[in-house]
């Protein structure tokens, strides 16, 4: 989920807590809601370093109490009830982490004990329905200053996420697919990636009508092509970062080979995310390598 939406969610909590006279606790919740995405700092070390660490350490359940403690300490001058402020900062962090866990990129939920990325693929990182819900309730709680409106928002939000999770699970069980990635616009539409004997297949699945649209097959690359690709450090790095990097196109011309690989399990950034292009000469020597990240 993008940082603007996390901030809006934190804003609703802040207004709701302010109504009860807990302004500092509200500020702590808001800070906890956005702090995990400040890992954009890793960008100073390069895009690949950023992707390796994005939604990693700052999205860990083990690290969350430490960040909450630092946030509480930073507000120490204004504190009346430090334990409640700490609890709200931690709740904001946990809400952020668990929401990103339901998204399609994956988070380092148990870092540093495990560097595995976890994701449910239940809610797309930008969900139109959730944005409409957030905008509606933000306006209501801002103008009416009513605690029950704020509570109602979080209840409605969680119900939607739980129902999306159940629908996603149903679609995966029904289709026996590798991945079912939810649409950002249609709550009942999914992008499907499934294995076939000769490669992988992708299509759009309408869960209500059970329609399969825009089907596309990607054949398995030859062992020779895979051997060439493995000569590229960029390819190997991107393969570690992505969920399902797959060679989608091989072009041979004028004694040169061009290999294109894409992450077929992530729909972010217009499908350009992690697109990797490798250029070899007729002897298999790597001439150039690049990745769109």
Image (cartoon, grey):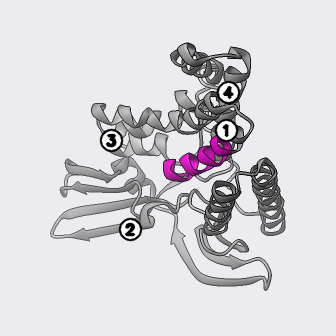
Locate residue 147 relative to residue 47 in the image: left or right. right
Locate residue 23 relative to residue 232 in the image: left or right. right
Mark earlier in primary sequence (1, 2): 1
Instruction: Identify the residue position indicated by label 4 in the image.
Output: 90
Instruction: Identify the residue position indicated by label 2 in the image.
Output: 249
Which is closer to the viewer, label 4 or label 2? 4
- The image shows residue 136, relative to residue 288, as above or below, that is below
Give the Cα distance between marks 1 and 3: 39 Å
Per the image, label 1 sits on a secondary structure element best described as helix
Q: Do the residues labelled 1 and 3 touch (CB within 8 Å)?
A: no
Mark earlier in primary sequence (4, 2): 4
Residue 14 lies in the magenta stretch: yes
Per the image, label 3 sits on a secondary structure element best described as helix
Q: What stretch is highlighted in magenta?
A: 1-15
- The image shows residue 52, relative to residue 139, as above or below, that is above
Instruction: Identify the residue position indicated by label 1 in the image.
Output: 18
Which is closer to the viewer, label 2 or label 3? 3
Mark earlier in primary sequence (2, 3): 3
Q: Where is residue 181 in the image (x, y as percent from the top left)?
A: 64, 63
């Amino acid at each position: 989920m993008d940082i603007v939406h996390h901030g809006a969610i934190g804003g609703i909590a802040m207004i709701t807590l302010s109504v009860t006279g807990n302004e500092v606790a509200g500020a702590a919740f808001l800070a906890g809601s956005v702090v995990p995405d400040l890992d954009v700092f890793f960008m100073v070390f390069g895009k690949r370093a950023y992707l390796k660490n994005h939604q990693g350490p700052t999205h860990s359940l083990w690290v969350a109490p430490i960040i909450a403690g630092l946030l509480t300490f930073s507000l120490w001058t204004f504190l009346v009830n430090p334990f409640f402020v700490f609890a709200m900062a931690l709740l904001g962090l946990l809400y952020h982490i668990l929401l990103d866990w339901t998204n399609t990129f994956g988070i380092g939920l148990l870092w540093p004990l495990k560097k595995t990325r976890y994701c449910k693929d239940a809610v797309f990182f930008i969900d139109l329905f959730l944005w409409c819900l957030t905008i509606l309730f933000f306006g209501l709680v801002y103008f009416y200053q009513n605690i029950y409106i704020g509570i109602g928002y979080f209840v409605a939000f969680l119900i939607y996420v739980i129902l999306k999770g159940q629908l996603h699970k149903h679609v995966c069980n029904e289709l026996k697919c590798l991945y079912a990635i939810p649409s950002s616009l249609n709550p009942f539409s999914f992008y499907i990636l499934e294995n076939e004997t000769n490669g992988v297949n992708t299509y759009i699945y309408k869960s209500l009508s059970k329609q399969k649209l825009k089907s596309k097959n990607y054949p398995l690359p030859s062992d020779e092509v895979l051997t060439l690709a493995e000569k590229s450090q960029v390819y190997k790095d991107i393969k570690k970062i992505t969920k399902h990097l797959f060679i989608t196109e091989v072009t041979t011309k004028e004694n040169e080979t061009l290999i294109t690989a894409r992450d077929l399990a992530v729909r972010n950034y217009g499908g350009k995310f992690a697109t990797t292009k490798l250029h070899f000469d007729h002897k298999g020597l790597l001439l150039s390598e690049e990745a769109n990240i």
